Amino acid sequence: MEKIIDENKQGEKLATIATEGNTRKLFIESYGCQMNFSDSEIVASIMAKEGFNTTQNLEDADLVLVNTCSIRDKAEQTIRNRLKKYNDIKRKINPNMKVGVLGCMAERLKDKFLEEEKIVDLVVGPDAYKDLPNLIKEVDDGRNAMNVILSKEETYGDIAPVRLNSNGVTAFVSITRGCDNMCTFCVVPFTRGRERSRDPQSVIEEINQLVDKGFKEVTLLGQNVDSYLWYGGGLKKDFKNASEMQKATAVDFAKLLDMVAIAQPKLRIRFSTSNPQDMSLEVIHVMAKHRNICKYIHLPVQSGSDRVLKLMNRQHTRKEYMELVDNIYKIVPEMALSQDMISGFPTETEEDHQDTLYLMKYVKYDFGFMFAYSERPGTLAARKMEDDIPLEIKKRRLQEVINLQQEIGHQRLKLHVGKIQEVLIEKSSKKSDQHWAGRNTQNTMVVFPKNGQYKPGDFVNVKINECTSATLLGEAVGYSENN
Ligand code: SAH
Ligand code: F3S
């Protein structure tokens, strides 16, 4: 999830909202996965009711909230450096500024944060944002405040997020929270708690509101969207017993996707992230059935070696993964796939590494997010396995994985050249304000010259003429039928 934000939104993002009558200023910034960016929109909504408008200016903020990431050690170091910056500003310019940490680091470090980082006044875990009004009162009274209680139910389904830094075209909608998978390297199950799914009705309502406001694309978010499952709903009297009722009214991810696609046939729908072990062929069939569901799946695999997959507690073999990929391409030949890979997991051998490279060649991923293994305190891997691959070797293997991905990605990119593709215009190109930028269904960035007629939010047919290392270049040839 992370890099997608890095590429499309350039890391941290600031935002402003202004509600009349609000007098206090909140500076909120987010790091890490899309879920954090989405959570910050929930937090901004809660804080707006408490009298806070957001500001882009750190120097005159009454309150700074930073939504943090723990996924790798480097992510945590980035936040520590950021806290130093807040400290500087507080000392030199803004002595009354209060600082709160939200998200995964808050959950992982708890009161250690208050001890280790004197600048921090407030620590709030991902399931405790509704307690912010009480916690802020504590801070106003001069006390440090903390709530890091995880929940089995909280989905924030009843909170209308405030869209931060919105391009007005694309938005995130979270559908599940937490993760029950317990991959041995991963800190997420500890920081985000048990997996729970959000009421499909509230998902559809949020999407309808987005469409009313002019949004053209949503990304359904979860650590593991394919295990989405909702049991509620239905009238008890219509069923003989509880289990019959549950079966009849259960909504799984395939059904949710179908519901959303039917409810808003002109809206583009994406989702992230899919865990291969939970992805059903039903989902692929639903993708094939609806033209408005984008033909792209982020399908992290982490390693191509059966031995390593087992040590990682990934619940599928390399063969099963390859079969899933074969089926995906069979059902939707134009599908784009991306991966997450970890190089240098404990005990990884050269042979395991070669298995990963082989798998990449087999699947032909369009792009990928690749990392060196970073030991996370408290995870099973940290407790039971020695982080025994020397940094130099981790780095070398990672570089080989990255190089191969670039090569394969470029081959895949070239396949688009010469075609006419539907692009949803999102914004001006980063490199030139004379060009529009948007994505095709496969999630590849497409850049083409502006010619006065089109605007962000338009679906345009673009003839692809050439490609750079990661972007397609083309020219608009008319509105697409989706407009
Ligand atoms: N299901 C999640 C995965 C979250 S973590 C999702 O929605 O994307 C994102 C990626 O970070 C993982 O797929 C994995 O490749 C990487 N990652 C997680 N823990 C890691 C660790 N300890 N060291 C290196 N990379 C890690
Ligand atoms: Fe982490 Fe595995 Fe869940 S990578 S988020 S424990 S699917």
Image: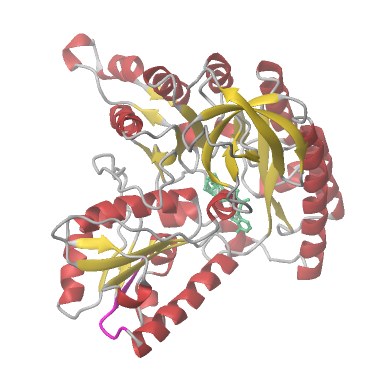
Say whether residue 320 is left or right of residue 404.
Answer: left
Residue placed most toward the observer, 413 or 344: 413
Say whether residue 132 is left or right of residue 194.
Answer: left
Q: Is residue 263 visible?
A: yes
Say whether residue 144 is left or right of residue 290.
Answer: left
User: Which residue appears at 33% of the width and 14% of the height?
Assistant: 248
Q: Quadrant of residue 371?
A: bottom right
Q: Residue furthest front?
A: 452
Magenta run includes residue 409 = no
Say whether residue 133 is left or right of residue 371.
Answer: left
Q: Quadrant of residue 157?
A: top left
User: Which residue appears at 20% of the width and 68% of the height?
Assistant: 24
User: Which residue appears at 37% of the width and 66% of the height?
Assistant: 56
Magenta run includes residue 99 = yes
Residue placed most toward the observer, 280 or 23: 23
Q: Which residues are magenta?
A: 94-101
Q: Is residue 118 visible?
A: no
Residue placed most toward the observer, 229 or 210: 210
Q: Residue furthest bottom?
A: 92
Spot occupied by residue 40 in the image (x, y as percentages of width and height): 36, 55
When the figure is inspected, residue 272 is found, relative to residue 92, above or below; the finding is above
Q: Look at the image and name its color scheme.
A: secondary structure
Spot occupied by residue 286 in the image (x, y as percentages of width and height): 52, 18
Spot occupied by residue 343 in the image (x, y as percentages of width and height): 73, 56
Residue placed most toward the observer, 160 or 400: 160
Q: Total marks drawn?
A: 0
When the figure is inspected, residue 149 is found, relative to residue 265, above or below; the finding is below
